[in-house]
Amino acid sequence: DAKTTQPPSMDCAEGRAANLPCNHSTISGNEYVYWYRQIHSQGPQYIIHGLKNNETNEMASLIITEDRKSSTLILPHATLRDTAVYYCIVRVLGSGGSNYKLTFGKGTLLTVNP
Amino acid sequence: SQTIHQWPATLVQPVGSPLSLECTVEGTSNPNLYWYRQAAGRGLQLLFYSVGIGQISSEVPQNLSASRPQDRQFILSSKKLLLSDSGFYLCAWSGRGSLRNEQFFGPGTRLTVL
């Protein structure tokens, strides 16, 4: 899986948009960008994923650059409950057990302040 | 709906003692199953994954082993615990043929080896 680079920490004011960047300059054509988050002492939670088009769901938006070498996760109106470690992961989308593996880096600790 | 259970939630064990952590999934059939470990201040590390009963793949050499005696049961074991085995152990599952390839994590077991 391609390696990702994320800032170790970020702060955001409650109610404002949180923009979390991720660099994945060695991403392959068949690799997707996934975002998970882990609230303290809980298991990670899936947020969103995409290949090359921008994606939006009820939790967040994912913006992928045209060259696919970087992406940004956007939480449009951050709340205190969004304080968590956010992981950017790139991997293939395919059948077979090994293709389902997730390789977690250290992620970004997002702290939402009141 | 699908649920994933892990027990115990917390565990304190002496060095050299055996370990058995259990994970069960409800509401789905033939899932892929995973064991992760998160040491203090570090990221999640995949330990084992399984695509079916009796099929275990190990990601890193270590003092642990895994077994899958039933379709929805995944067990993490050790014959003799080391201090370095302390950490937060997470079980996860993913469905076959899922378009999102999303992994669903359990609540985790916090293991302290003294």
Image: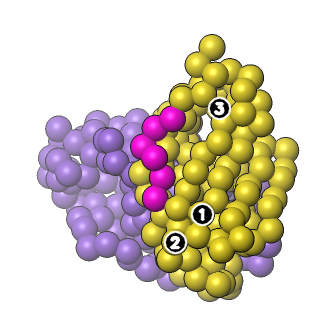
Chain colours: A yellow, B purple
- Residue A26 at what x, y percent from top left? 50, 77
State the residue position of label 1: A70
Does any portion of residue B12 appear in the rendered image? yes
Regarding mark 2 in the picture, which secondary structure is present there? loop
Whole-percent x, y for residue A54 in the image: 80, 61
* 3 and 2 marks in contact (CB < 8 Å): no
Q: Quadrant of residue A31?
A: bottom right
Residue denoted by label 2: A25
Is B11 located above or below residue B73 in the figure?
above
Q: Is mark 1 in CB contact (under 8 Å) with mark 2?
A: yes
The amino acid pointed to by label 2 is Ser
Depth check, mark 1 against mark 3: the one in front is 1
Q: Chain of mark 2?
A: A
The residue beneath circle 3 is: A82
Task: Answer with mark 3 or mark 2, whichever residue precedes in sequence.
Answer: 2
With respect to residue B113, does A82 lie above or below? above
Residue A102 in the image, given as x and y percentages of width and height? 53, 67
B31 or B72, which is in the foreground? B31
Q: Quadrant of residue A42?
A: top right
Residue at the (48%, 52%) spot, across then down: A6
Q: Which residues are magenta?
A: A5-10
| Residue A100 in sight here | no
Pointer 1 chain: A
The residue mark sitting in front, 3 or 2, is 2
What amino acid is labelled 3 in the image?
Asp
Return the residue found at the far front: A66
